[in-house]
Image: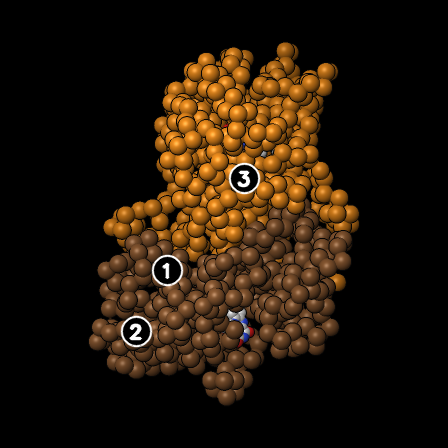
Chain colours: A brown, B orange
């Protein structure tokens, strides 16, 4: 929702009339579950918690002339630029727009996406939902943890657990290197003496009711061993949430009145990245709504999917969907979330043996 | 002691349909299920196919019931408010051996009285299913075949039985049965029941339950299978059920386009093995691994499936996998000769009214209603019961908000705003539907129970997004703490209630 807030602000600054539709009871999105500091260094020049970061933008939205529908889900985007929304208070409505910005964030890849065998007990959580259960729900989700995947969210959750006196046995990473930012590896793992085991993965989950342990495979040396734990946290990839586009996509390329920003566009490393990109998307969308022209550089969800997508175009469009400023796209074909770049020689950086990325 | 005319043991497909069958007679009936919820055994994890009946030997009870069931399945689902994807099936092969099997099945099918079968050339197969590997040799199309959600079917039967006066008791594990007068005294959970007659549908334990009264002539020797589920993003990749008849001996691949729009891949066939690693670790804990029927998927099994996919449909987008699961087959075996039995086994006790369904495997789902009618009729005649003229076979489907046209949906939300609030993002399922699944008998009491009734958590985030709010809603309805809610019954608590070590 960081994205939506900024986009709304960007649009509002151009005197466009703006509505935000948010499923949750409050604005802020994933930031609302981030009780830790480390947000806003680039944008605000100071370190905020995710909650405070979101609050700053939410306040700006409050004071601007923006209609806010909280507790309301968008359920359909029609080719006639209507957005159908559903909420307990809002009822079922169709909002007519001139431009639509999709800022629906991302979703976490579930454990079932991985070739992990075993039972299906309770006590297996994705990192983001574990974070939400602990930080928003205030629940105690377990005592002995194994963390599968060294993505940023997984490492931040590991730190949170260590800080609350829980036992984090290890963070397991299938590839050679840590999956998240080096700063997080140092701040979240090394500082708390949490071992990061690379070339290691969970091959089997055990337990009839609750998880009672995992079989861990050592991919470098071969062999496997059993680790006793009562909770398994997975941080094995984020996938842009774009289900709302399925209907439009089945009708052909995405229309020019549709814009994407934030994690719905591609998975950003930091909230600040999201903010900069989304403010720009907001003003571009406002321009489009008011003047009917689409400026170059606007994010566009279908470009990376369409066959006509060329490296030259990618560069010309800078921030094309699924692409970061530097032209990267996050592949979702496997849990590794590799970043790939389209060059004249084809896609570079994909390690999963595909010749083009899957952007979910 | 609670007194009944008839008691059904086991709340799987067979037990729920037997109970519904008994509701058609003037009998005071109870159903006893050991777990917290119905449909948690074999009936929860299977291939979910309605078979048309060409696959089984002529003259068997299986064949008779299956052919009849498949023909009427759409109507019968309509009656129970259950969704049925009557997509037809396609058996395909990649060489001479498979082709011979297919020609044989067509002969067998017409002998069984199955209609709507046709032999397909390679071109015909590819026209129906363009994504099948081009090396395909020939195929067999069967019209009267389709797929349901097993738990939807099972819970609709239970709900209809309850609507017609059957008492359903959960957490009622039958531990002892003794003869008393003409009938039986049954110890189940913390209660005692008296029944004049029993229908035993105890799934993998049916032989043991029968032996509580008299030694069962039939035993169960389980084996296991693995499945992979693909996200709805893969929907449209196939439009029929596809059975692969391999050239070498062994189990072929099955692909099913489910009612929910997913693709189900599987099952493998491998020995049932108790989970050694789990058993060791859980030795000190309360959970009893191995006692549970699901021993877990095997890596080899999952790999075998992927290897077969490469052969049958290499373009299948397996990267959209969202879940894997395992199933346990209750293979019936003649205890004296140790020979496996190839038909449904209905064991009747001579001296008293005990009827056991032992080792009912495929096509047990297809035939659940026919079997229910069959065994309830047998018991009713033994107990001398007349038909119940007040029996109402229909059951209204639960509200499925997402499937409604805009205006109807708008009206529904105006009448009850809970149908406006979306809880499960992947499935578009609302708070109103979650509440219905808790409030309508037999109501959900676990997280997975809501999944089986409302369809939450089945999508690509697998409950990552909605679990917490569902747990809180459930706790609110049941007047307990969220920490008391389990994923799927005993031991599967979600939040920690244990003292921190
Ligand atoms: C789990 C997680 C932890 C993170 N932790 C950090 C961190 O510690 N530090 C850091 O710098 N960055 C972190 N990030 C990255 C960064 O904060 C986020 O990328 C950024 O906030 C994303 O903003 P967004 O608006 O794109 O997505 P979100 O914040 O996810 O917002 C999407 C919003 O859309 C709403 N929505 C979705 N679909 C609908 C619909 N159909 N109808 C109505 N509303 C809908 C959602 O409810 C949500 O509020 C984290 C990201 C994630 C996913
Ligand atoms: C791998 C596999 C795939 C299949 N695919 C298909 C298919 O595609 N099409 C088809 O038609 N059929 C299929 N079947 C067959 C079908 O699933 C089964 O025949 C059917 O589900 C059996 O139902 P049930 O009620 O006997 O067993 P269950 O669902 O296991 O029910 C038995 C119940 O009894 C309870 N119970 C046990 N002991 C006690 C006790 N002591 N006291 C109280 N309760 C007790 C258990 O908890 C359980 O709920 C398949 C089966 C398998 C194994």
Q: Judge from the rendering whether residue A289 lies leftward or rightward of residue A230; answer left or right.
A: left
Q: Chain of mark 3?
A: B
Find disc 3 in the rendering and name its residue: B311
Q: Secondary structure under badge 2?
A: helix
Q: Residue B392: x percent and y percent?
A: 38, 27
Q: Label 1 is found on which chain of the structure? A: A
Please say if A330 is above or below B62: below
**Compared with residue A357, is residue A210 higher up or lower down, i.e. above or below?**
above
Q: Is residue B167 left or right of residue B239?
A: right
Residue at 57% over, 66% down: A131
Which disc is residue A285 wearing?
Answer: 2
Q: In which quadrant is the C terminus of chain A drawn?
A: bottom left
Q: Are marks 2 and 1 on the same chain?
A: yes
- Name the residue at 63% across, 34% down: B269
Please say if the residues under marks 1 and 3 sit with CB atoms less than 8 Å apart. Answer: no
Q: Identify the residue at horizontal 62%, vertical 28% (top origin).
A: B249
């Amino acid at each position: 929702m960081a994205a939506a807030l900024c986009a709304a602000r960007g649009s509002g600054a151009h005197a466009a009339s703006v509505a935000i539709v948010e499923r949750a009871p409050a604005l802020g999105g994933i930031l609302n579950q981030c009780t830790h500091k480390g947000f806003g260094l680039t944008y605000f020049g100071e370190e905020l918690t995710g909650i405070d970061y979101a609050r700053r933008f939410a306040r700006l939205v409050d004071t601007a002339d923006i209609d806010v529908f909280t507790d309301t889900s968008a359920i359909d985007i029609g080719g006639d630029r209507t957005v159908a929304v559903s909420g307990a208070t809002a009822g079922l409505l169709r909002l007519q727009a001139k431009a639509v910005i999709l800022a629906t964030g991302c979703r976490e890849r579930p454990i079932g996406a991985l070739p992990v065998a075993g039972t299906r007990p309770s006590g297996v959580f994705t990192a983001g939902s574990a974070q939400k259960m602990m930080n928003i729900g205030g629940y105690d989700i377990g005592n002995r943890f194994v963390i599968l995947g060294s993505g940023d969210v997984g490492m931040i959750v590991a730190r949170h657990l260590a800080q609350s006196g829980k036992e984090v046995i290890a963070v397991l990473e299938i590839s050679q290197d840590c999956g998240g930012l080096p700063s997080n590896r140092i701040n979240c793992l090394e500082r708390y003496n949490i071992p990061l085991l690379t070339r290691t993965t969970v091959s089997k989950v055990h337990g009839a009711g609750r998880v009672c342990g995992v079989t861990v495979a050592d991919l470098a040396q071969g062999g496997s061993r059993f680790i006793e734990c009562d909770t398994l946290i997975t941080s094995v990839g984020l996938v842009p949430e774009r289900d709302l586009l399925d209907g439009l996509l089945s009708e052909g390329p995405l229309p020019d009145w549709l814009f994407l920003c934030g994690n719905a566009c591609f998975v950003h490393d930091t909230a600040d990245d999201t903010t900069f990109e989304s403010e720009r998307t907001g003003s571009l969308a406002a321009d489009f709504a008011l003047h009917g022209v689409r400026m170059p550089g606007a994010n566009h969800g279908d470009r990376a999917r369409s066959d006509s997508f060329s490296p030259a175009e990618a560069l010309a469009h800078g921030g094309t969907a699924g692409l970061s400023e530097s032209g990267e796209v996050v592949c979702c074909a496997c849990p590794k979330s590799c970043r790939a770049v389209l060059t004249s020689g084809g896609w570079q950086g994909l390690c999963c043996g595909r010749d083009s990325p899957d952007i979910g | 002691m609670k007194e009944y005319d008839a008691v059904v043991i086991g709340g799987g497909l067979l037990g729920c349909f037997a109970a519904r069958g008994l509701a058609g007679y003037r009998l005071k009936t109870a159903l006893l299920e050991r777990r917290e919820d119905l449909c948690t055994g074999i009936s929860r994890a299977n291939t979910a196919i309605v078979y048309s009946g060409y696959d089984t030997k002529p003259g068997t009870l299986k064949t008779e019931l299956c052919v009849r069931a498949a023909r009427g399945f759409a109507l019968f689902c309509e009656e129970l408010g259950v969704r049925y994807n009557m997509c037809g099936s396609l058996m395909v092969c990649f060489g001479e051996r498979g082709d011979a099997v297919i020609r044989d099945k067509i002969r067998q099918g017409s002998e069984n009285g199955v209609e709507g079968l046709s032999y397909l050339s390679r071109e015909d197969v590819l026209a129906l299913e363009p994504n099948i590997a081009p090396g395909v040799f020939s195929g067999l199309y069967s019209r009267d075949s389709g797929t349901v959600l097993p738990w939807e079917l099972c819970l609709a039967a239970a709900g209809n039985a309850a609507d017609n006066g059957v008492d359903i008791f959960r957490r009622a594990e039958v531990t002892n049965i003794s003869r008393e007068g003409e009938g039986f005294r049954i110890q189940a959970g913390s209660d005692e029941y008296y029944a004049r007659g029993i229908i035993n549908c105890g799934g993998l334990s049916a032989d043991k339950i029968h032996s509580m009264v008299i030694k069962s002539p039939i035993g169960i020797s389980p084996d296991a299978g693995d499945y992979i589920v693909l996200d709805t993003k893969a929907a449209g990749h196939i439009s029929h059920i596809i059975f692969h008849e391999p050239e070498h001996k062994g189990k072929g691949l099955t692909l099913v386009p489910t009612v929910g729009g997913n693709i189900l891949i599987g099952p493998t066939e491998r020995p049932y093995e108790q989970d050694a690693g789990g058993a060791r670790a859980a030795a000190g804990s309360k959970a009893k691994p191995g006692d549970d029927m699901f021993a877990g998927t095997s890596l080899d099994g999952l790999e075998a499936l992927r290897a077969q996919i490469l052969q049958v449909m290499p373009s299948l987008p397996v990267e959209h996998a969202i879940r894997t699961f395992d199933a346990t087959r209750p293979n019936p075996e003649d205890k004296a000769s140790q020979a496996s039995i190839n038909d449904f086994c209905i064991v009747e006790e001579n001296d008293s009214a005990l009827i056991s369904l032992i080792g009912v495997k495929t096509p047990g789902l297809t035939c659940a209603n026919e079997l229910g009618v069959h065994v309830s009729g047998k018991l009713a005649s033994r107990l001398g019961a007349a038909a119940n003229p007040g029996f109402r076979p229909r059951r209204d489907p639960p509200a499925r908000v997402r499937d409604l046209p805009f205006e109807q949906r708008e009206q529904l939300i105006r009448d009850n705003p809970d149908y406006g609030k979306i809880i499960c993002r992947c499935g578009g399922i609302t708070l109103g539907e979650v509440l219905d699944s808790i409030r309508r008998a037999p109501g959900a009491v676990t997280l997975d129970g809501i999944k089986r009734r409302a369809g939450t958590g089945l999508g690509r985030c697998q409950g990552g997004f909605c679990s917490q709010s569902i747990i809180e809603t459930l706790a609110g309805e049941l007047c307990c703490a969220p920490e008391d809610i389990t994923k799927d019954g005993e031991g599967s608590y979600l939040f920690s209630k244990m003292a921190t070590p």
